Image (cartoon, coloured by chain):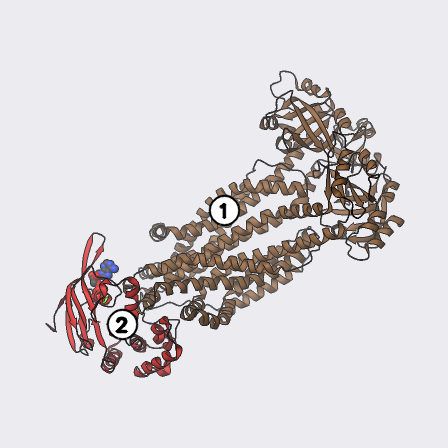
C-alpha cells in the first residue's frame, strides 16, 4: 500500500517559485492500476519522481508498505528504487549500448545477481511482452512501441511492489500506444503489481482501474470531470 | 555575424570557464614549449655569435693555427706584408676563475699597442685616453675585467683574482674595469684582458701565438691576400675571414637545435587534439541552438564560421599566454642549454634572451594553425546540422558515423609514406626527412586509432565484463560507441606516450651503448688530467709531473695522450696522439671490424691511423682508404687501419701513435692527460696521494679512477638529455588535459543514460566506477598503441635520425622496465583524470535528468 500525506514540492526559478506538487494526499492499494491525468506542466512527472524515490518532497510523507521513504538515507533510497520500484519513462528508457535482453536484465545485473537466475526471469518477461525473438537487438534496431514494451519488462524484472509509468505512450502513435497500454494492463493483472500511470491522454488512462485528475500541482480526487 | 558570434560563442566560453581554461592552457603550453625552446636555442647561438663578432673587431682576416697555435715569427712575416694595413697578435684561453668565484672566463692576451686598431675598449671612470689605460696592462700580473663581472663578485681595482688554466693556478691583480661595450660583451662579460707577454709567460707559451688579426690596405681583395698568405705560411696555419668561424659554430650545433625543435613541436601536435575536443564539446552542447539558428535562416558557412571563430579565439588566447609563458621558459631552458652546449661543443655563457619577433610570430601562427586544424572537423559537423533537428530536441540521437575503413586506409598510407621518407638521405647533414617520417608515423598511428580502439576493446571486453561485471561491460561498450570522441583523446595520449616511450628507448639504448663502451675502452687504473678542463681549451699537464709519473711505484705502463683539435677537410676532429704499444697491450678500442690489438699494432708499426665512426661517415672514408691531414710538413696521407666507435664528441677522432706524430709535428712534450696501468693489488688511494705530493703549489690536476671516469661520462650523458625529459613531461600533461576534457564531454552526452541507470537502481558508486573504468580503459588502449608506435619511432630515432645527425651507432635495446613504468604512469593519470568526470556523472539528480528533453 502506498500512502501520500500532504506532499509538497516547490521549485525556484530565478525569482519565481513554482509549486509543482501542492499538498497532495493519496492512498493506493496494493495491486491497483491507477492513472493520474493532467495537462502538461501540472506536476505529474514531479509527483512520479517523489513516489519513485528519485527526488524528495519539501514537505509531507510518503509511506510505501509502511516505510516512510522521505526519511530514508541516500543509499537506502537507491536500494528502494532498485528493489521496489520499476519505472517506465516517456523518452530514453533504454540504454543504447545494451541489447534488449541486457536492458531488461539491467536492474538485476546491477545487483550482481547470478546469471542463471537473471536469464530465466528475462526470458519469462520478454515472452510476456512478446519480444523474445528480438532479445539480441539493440534499441536503435527496434520500433518505439517495442522499446516501451522492453521498458515495461525491465520495470518488472525485479518483482517490484510498484511500477511507475510517465507518459509511456506520449511519444507513440495511437495504435502503438494502445498496444503498449494493453500489455501494461495485462501484466499488472498477471504479476499483481501496483501500477501508477501518469498521462495526459484519457485514452491511455482508460486502461486503469482508477483515475485521478491533477491540475496546477493539486490532485482532485477520482474522475471529477472527464 | 560578429554579434551572433559574441552571443553564441563568447557566452558559451564564459559558462564553461573551467573546460575552456584547460584547453587554453594545453594550447598555451604547446606554444610555450615551442617559443621557449626556439628562443633559448637562438639566444645561446646569438650570444656566442656576439662573442665572436665583438672579439673580431675590425679584423678582415684572421691567421689561425691548429692545436697549440703557431710561432711568433709568423707575426713578423705577416705584418711586414704590404697588403696588410695592420696586424695584432692574440692569445686566447678558456680559464676558470677560482677565487673569489667559480666561473669560466675567456682570457685574452693582447698587444696593448697594436690592438687599438682593432678593438675599442671602454674603461670605467677613466679620464685618460683609452690607450693610456691599456698600458696599465703591461705591469706584471695586471688584468682587466668587465664591470659586470667585477660587480657581480664584489671585486674592485687592486683586488687579486685567482684562475685555473688547465693544471696551472695563476694569480692576477685587477687593474682596470671595462664597460660592457664592444668586445667586452664577449661571453656576457666573462672576459679578462692581460698583456700578451704576461700571458705567454704565465701560460708557458713563450714564443707562441693563437691568432693574428689583420686589416688590409685599401684596394686589395681579401681573398687574394688570403691565398698569398697561405702560400707564405706553414701548411698547418690557415687564414680565413672571421665570418667563417661563425658559420662553423652554427653548423656545429644545428643538429642539436633541430632535435630540440622537433621535440617541442610534439606538444603543439597534442594541442590539435585538445582543440578538437573543446570545439566538439561546444558543438554538442549547442546542437539545439545551432538547429534553431538554421531554422532562423543562418547559412551553413556562418555556422562553420561561428565555431571556427571560437577555436581561433582559444588559439589566439593560447598564443598570447603561450608566448609569455614561453619567454619565461626560455630563461630556464637557456641555462640548461648553455650548460650542455658548453659541455659538448664550445664555451658559451648566455644570460640574456634575444627575443626574435619571427619566433614569436611563428609560435602565435602555430597556435592559430593548431586551432584551425583541431576546430575544422567539429565545426564542419556543426555546419551540417539540419534545421529539422530543432524539432526533435531529444529523440533524435544524432549518430556521427565514422568511416573507419577510410580512416584506417589513410593511416596505413601515412605509415607507408613514413617508411619511404625514412629511407631518404639527409639534407646538408640534417635528417629532415627523418623528422618528416617521425611526424608521419605519429599522424599515421592517430588515424589507425579508431580501428585499433575497436580491436583492442573487443579483445579486452570479455575480461572486463568478467572482472568488473556490468560496470566493465558498459564501460567497454560505451568506449566502442563513442569512438568519434574517445578516439581523439586516445590518439592524443597515444602520441604523447609514443614520444615518451620512443625517446626513453632511444636514450636508454644510447646510454647502454655508452656504458658498454666505457667498460670496454676504459681499462687503465688512474687517469690524470688538468683540473681546469674546459671545452675548447688547449691545456696540458705540467711536463715535470708527467716525467715523474713514470717512476711511480707499482706502475706497469703509462699511456700519454695528446689531444689536438683540428679540421680535416672542414670537419672538426680531434687528433688523439698516444702510446699505442701500451694501449694495444693493456687496453683496447671498440672497432667496427677487426681486432683492437692487430689494428693498433699496424698503426704503430706502419704509421697508419684509426678513425672514428663519425669521421668515417662524414668524410666517407672506410678501412683501407687514405686520410689526408695537414701537418707542418704539408699535406700527408695516412692509411686507415680501422674504424672505431666513440661517443665522446660529435666531431670526428683520429688515433695516431706518438712515433708517427713525431715524424710530422714538432714534439713539444705537451700531454692532455695520462693513463696509468698499475700492478694488480696496488692501492689507488696511496698512488693518488703520492702523485699529489709531486705537484707544485701552483698546479692542480684531477686524478680519476676508471670507475669514476665511467661515472663521469654517464653523468654528462644524462645532463645532456635533461631538457628532453622536461619536454616529455609537458607533452604528457597536455595529453592528460585531453583525457579530462573528453571524459567530461562523454559524461555529458550520456547524462540521460546515467539518469536511467540511477532510476533503475545503479548506485552512485557503480556509475563512478563505470566512468573510471572507461578512463582506465582509454589509458590502457593509449598505452598499447603508444607502445607499438613508440617502438617504431625509437627505431627511426636510433637508425635514421640519430645516425644522420650525429653518426653514432647505437645498439638497439628495449628496456622492459620502461613499459611497466609508463603503464603505471598512464593508468594513474587516466584514473586521476577520470575522477573529475566521475563526479560530474553523479552530480545531477535523477529527477532533473529525467526531465531533460
Ligand atoms: N527542476 C525544475 N526547476 C524548476 N522548475 C521545474 C523543475 N522541474 C519541473 N518544474 C516545473 O514544475 C512544474 C511541473 O512540472 P512537471 O512535473 O514536469 O509537469 P508534467 O510532468 O505534468 O508536465 C512545471 O511548471 C515545471 O516547469
Ligand atoms: Mg512530465
The quarter of the displayed image where residue B756 is located: bottom left
Protein chain holding label 2: A
Quadrant of the image occupied by residue B81: top right
Give me the C-alpha separation between circle 1 and circle 2. 60 Å
Residue A215 visible in the snapshot: no
Q: Is mark 1 within 8 Å of ligand 1?
A: no
Which chain's colour is red? A
Tags 1 and 2 in contact by the CB under 8 Å rule? no
Quadrant of picture, ligand 1:
bottom left
Q: Which mark is residue B450?
A: none
Q: Is residue B695 left or right of residue B508?
A: right
Indicate whether B728 appears above or below B566: below
| Residue B364 numbered tag | 1
**Chain identity of mark 1:** B
Which residue bears the numbered disc 2?
Answer: A84
Q: Which chain is brown?
A: B
Which quadrant of the figure contains the C terminus of chain B? bottom left
At mark 1, the secondary structure is helix
Same subunit under labels 1 and 2? no
Spot occupied by residue A144 in the image (x, y as percentages of width and height)? 31, 75
Given this view, does label 1 or label 2 mark the residue nearer the observer?
2
Which of B248 and A64 lies nearest the eye of the viewer?
A64
Depth order, front residue of B164/B370: B164
Amino acid at each position: 500500500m502506498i500512502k501520500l500525506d500532504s506532499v509538497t514540492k516547490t521549485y525556484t526559478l530565478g525569482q519565481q517559485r513554482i509549486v509543482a506538487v501542492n499538498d497532495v494526499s493519496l492512498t493506493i492499494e496494493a495491486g491497483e492500476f491507477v492513472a493520474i491525468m493532467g495537462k502538461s506542466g501540472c506536476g505529474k512527472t514531479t509527483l512520479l519522481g517523489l513516489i519513485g524515490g528519485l527526488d524528495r518532497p519539501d514537505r509531507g510523507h510518503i509511506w510505501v508498505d509502511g516505510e516512510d521513504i522521505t526519511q530514508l538515507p541516500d543509499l537506502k533510497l537507491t536500494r528502494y528504487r532498485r528493489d521496489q520500484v520499476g519505472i517506465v519513462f516517456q523518452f530514453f528508457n533504454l540504454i543504447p549500448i545494451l541489447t534488449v535482453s541486457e536492458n531488461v536484465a539491467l536492474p538485476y545485473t546491477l545487483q550482481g545477481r547470478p546469471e542463471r537466475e537473471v536469464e530465466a526471469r528475462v526470458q519469462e518477461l520478454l515472452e510476456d511482452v512478446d519480444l523474445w525473438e528480438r532479445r539480441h537487438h539493440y534499441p536503435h534496431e527496434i520500433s518505439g512501441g517495442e522499446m516501451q514494451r522492453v521498458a515495461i519488462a525491465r520495470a518488472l524484472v525485479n518483482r517490484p511492489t510498484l511500477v511507475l509509468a510517465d507518459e509511456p505512450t506520449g511519444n507513440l502513435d495511437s495504435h502503438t500506444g494502445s498496444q503498449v497500454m494493453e500489455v501494461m494492463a495485462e501484466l499488472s493483472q498477471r504479476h499483481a503489481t501496483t501500477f501508477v500511470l501518469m498521462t495526459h491522454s484519457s485514452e491511455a488512462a482508460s486502461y486503469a482501474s482508477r483515475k485521478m485528475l491533477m491540475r496546477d500541482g493539486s490532485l482532485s480526487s477520482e474522475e471529477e470531470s472527464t | 555575424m560578429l554579434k551572433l558570434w559574441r552571443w553564441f560563442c563568447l557566452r558559451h566560453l564564459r559558462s564553461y570557464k573551467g573546460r575552456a581554461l584547460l584547453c587554453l592552457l594545453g594550447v598555451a603550453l604547446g606554444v610555450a614549449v615551442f617559443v621557449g625552446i626556439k628562443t633559448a636555442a637562438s639566444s645561446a647561438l646569438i650570444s656566442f655569435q656576439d662573442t665572436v663578432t665583438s672579439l673580431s673587431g675590425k679584423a678582415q682576416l684572421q691567421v689561425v693555427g691548429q692545436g697549440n697555435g703557431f710561432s711568433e715569427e709568423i707575426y713578423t712575416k705577416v705584418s711586414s706584408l704590404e697588403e696588410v694595413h695592420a696586424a695584432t697578435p692574440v692569445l686566447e684561453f678558456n680559464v676558470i676563475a677560482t677565487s673569489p668565484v667559480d666561473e669560466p672566463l675567456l682570457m685574452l692576451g693582447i698587444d696593448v699597442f697594436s690592438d687599438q686598431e682593432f678593438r675599442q675598449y671602454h674603461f670605467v671612470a677613466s679620464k685618460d685616453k683609452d690607450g693610456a689605460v691599456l698600458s696599465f696592462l703591461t705591469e706584471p700580473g695586471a688584468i682587466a675585467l668587465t664591470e659586470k663581472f667585477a660587480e657581480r663578485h664584489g671585486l674592485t681595482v687592486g683586488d687579486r683574482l685567482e684562475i685555473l688554466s688547465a693544471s696551472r693556478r695563476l694569480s692576477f691583480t685587477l687593474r682596470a674595469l671595462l664597460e660592457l661595450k664592444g668586445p667586452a660583451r664577449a661571453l656576457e662579460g666573462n672576459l679578462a684582458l692581460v698583456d700578451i707577454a704576461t700571458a705567454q709567460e704565465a701560460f708557458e707559451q713563450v714564443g707562441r701565438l693563437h691568432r693574428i688579426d689583420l686589416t688590409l690596405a685599401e684596394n686589395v681583395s681579401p681573398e687574394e691576400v688570403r691565398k698569398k698568405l697561405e702560400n707564405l705560411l706553414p701548411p698547418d696555419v690557415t687564414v680565413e675571414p672571421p665570418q667563417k668561424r661563425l658559420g662553423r659554430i652554427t653548423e656545429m650545433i644545428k643538429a642539436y637545435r633541430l632535435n630540440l625543435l622537433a621535440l617541442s613541436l610534439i606538444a603543439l601536435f597534442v594541442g590539435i587534439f585538445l582543440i578538437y575536443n573543446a570545439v566538439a564539446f561546444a558543438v554538442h552542447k549547442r546542437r539545439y541552438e545551432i538547429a534553431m539558428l538554421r531554422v532562423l535562416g543562418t547559412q551553413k558557412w556562418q555556422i562553420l564560421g561561428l565555431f571556427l571563430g571560437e577555436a581561433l579565439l582559444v588559439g589566439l588566447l593560447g598564443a598570447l599566454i603561450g608566448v609569455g609563458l614561453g619567454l619565461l621558459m626560455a630563461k630556464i631552458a637557456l641555462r640548461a642549454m648553455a650548460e650542455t652546449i658548453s659541455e659538448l661543443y664550445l664555451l658559451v655563457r648566455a644570460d640574456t634572451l634575444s627575443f626574435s619577433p619571427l619566433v614569436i610570430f611563428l609560435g602565435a601562427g602555430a597556435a592559430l594553425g593548431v586551432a584551425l586544424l583541431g576546430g575544422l572537423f567539429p565545426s564542419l559537423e556543426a555546419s551540417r546540422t539540419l534545421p529539422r533537428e530543432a524539432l526533435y530536441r531529444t529523440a533524435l540521437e544524432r549518430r556521427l558515423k565514422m568511416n573507419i575503413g577510410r580512416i584506417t586506409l589513410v593511416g596505413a598510407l601515412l605509415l607507408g609514406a613514413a617508411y619511404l621518407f625514412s629511407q631518404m638521405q639527409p639534407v646538408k647533414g640534417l635528417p629532415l626527412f627523418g623528422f618528416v617520417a617521425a611526424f608521419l608515423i605519429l599522424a599515421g598511428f592517430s588515424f589507425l586509432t579508431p580501428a585499433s580502439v575497436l580491436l583492442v576493446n573487443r579483445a579486452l571486453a570479455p575480461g572486463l565484463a568478467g572482472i568488473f561485471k556490468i560496470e566493465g561491460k558498459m564501460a567497454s561498450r560505451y568506449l566502442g560507441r563513442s569512438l568519434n570522441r574517445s578516439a581523439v583523446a586516445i590518439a592524443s595520449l597515444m602520441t604523447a606516450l609514443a614520444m615518451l616511450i620512443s625517446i626513453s628507448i632511444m636514450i636508454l639504448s644510447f646510454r647502454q651503448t655508452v656504458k658498454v663502451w666505457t667498460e670496454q675502452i676504459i681499462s687503465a687504473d688512474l687517469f690524470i688530467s688538468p683540473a681546469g678542463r674546459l671545452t675548447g681549451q688547449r691545456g696540458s699537464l705540467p711536463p715535470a709531473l708527467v716525467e715523474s709519473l713514470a717512476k711511480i711505484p707499482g706502475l706497469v705502463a703509462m699511456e700519454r695522450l695528446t689531444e689536438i683539435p683540428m679540421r680535416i677537410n672542414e670537419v672538426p676532429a680531434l687528433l688523439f696522439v698516444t702510446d699505442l704499444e701500451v694501449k694495444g697491450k693493456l687496453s683496447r678500442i671498440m672497432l667496427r671490424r677487426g681486432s683492437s690489438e692487430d689494428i693498433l699494432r699496424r698503426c704503430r708499426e706502419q704509421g697508419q691511423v684509426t678513425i672514428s665512426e663519425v669521421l668515417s661517415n662524414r668524410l666517407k672514408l672506410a678501412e683501407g682508404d687514405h686520410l689526408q691531414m695537414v701537418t707542418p710538413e704539408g699535406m700527408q696521407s695516412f692509411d686507415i687501419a680501422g674504424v672505431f666507435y666513440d661517443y665522446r664528441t660529435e666531431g670526428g677522432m683520429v688515433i695516431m701513435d706518438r712515433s708517427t706524430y713525431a715524424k710530422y709535428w714538432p714534439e713539444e712534450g705537451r700531454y692532455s692527460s695520462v693513463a696509468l696501468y698499475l700492478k694488480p693489488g696496488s692501492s689507488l688511494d696511496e698512488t693518488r696521494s703520492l702523485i699529489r705530493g709531486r705537484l707544485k703549489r701552483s698546479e692542480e690536476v684531477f686524478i680519476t679512477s676508471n670507475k669514476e671516469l665511467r661515472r663521469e661520462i654517464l653523468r654528462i650523458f644524462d645532463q645532456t638529455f635533461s631538457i628532453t625529459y622536461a619536454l616529455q613531461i609537458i607533452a604528457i600533461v597536455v595529453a592528460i588535459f585531453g583525457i579530462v576534457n573528453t571524459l567530461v564531454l562523454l559524461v555529458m552526452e550520456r547524462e540521460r543514460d546515467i539518469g536511467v541507470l540511477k532510476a533503475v537502481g545503479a548506485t552512485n558508486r557503480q556509475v563512478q566506477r563505470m566512468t573510471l573504468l572507461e578512463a582506465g580503459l582509454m589509458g590502457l588502449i593509449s598505452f598499447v598503441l603508444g607502445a607499438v608506435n613508440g617502438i617504431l619511432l625509437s627505431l627511426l630515432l636510433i637508425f635514421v635520425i640519430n645516425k644522420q645527425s650525429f653518426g653514432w651507432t647505437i645498439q638497439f635495446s628495449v628496456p622492459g622496465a620502461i613499459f611497466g613504468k609508463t603503464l603505471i604512469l598512464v593508468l594513474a593519470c587516466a584514473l586521476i583524470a577520470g575522477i573529475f568526470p566521475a563526479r560530474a556523472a553523479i552530480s545531477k539528480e535523477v529527477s532533473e535528468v529525467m526531465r531533460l528533453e
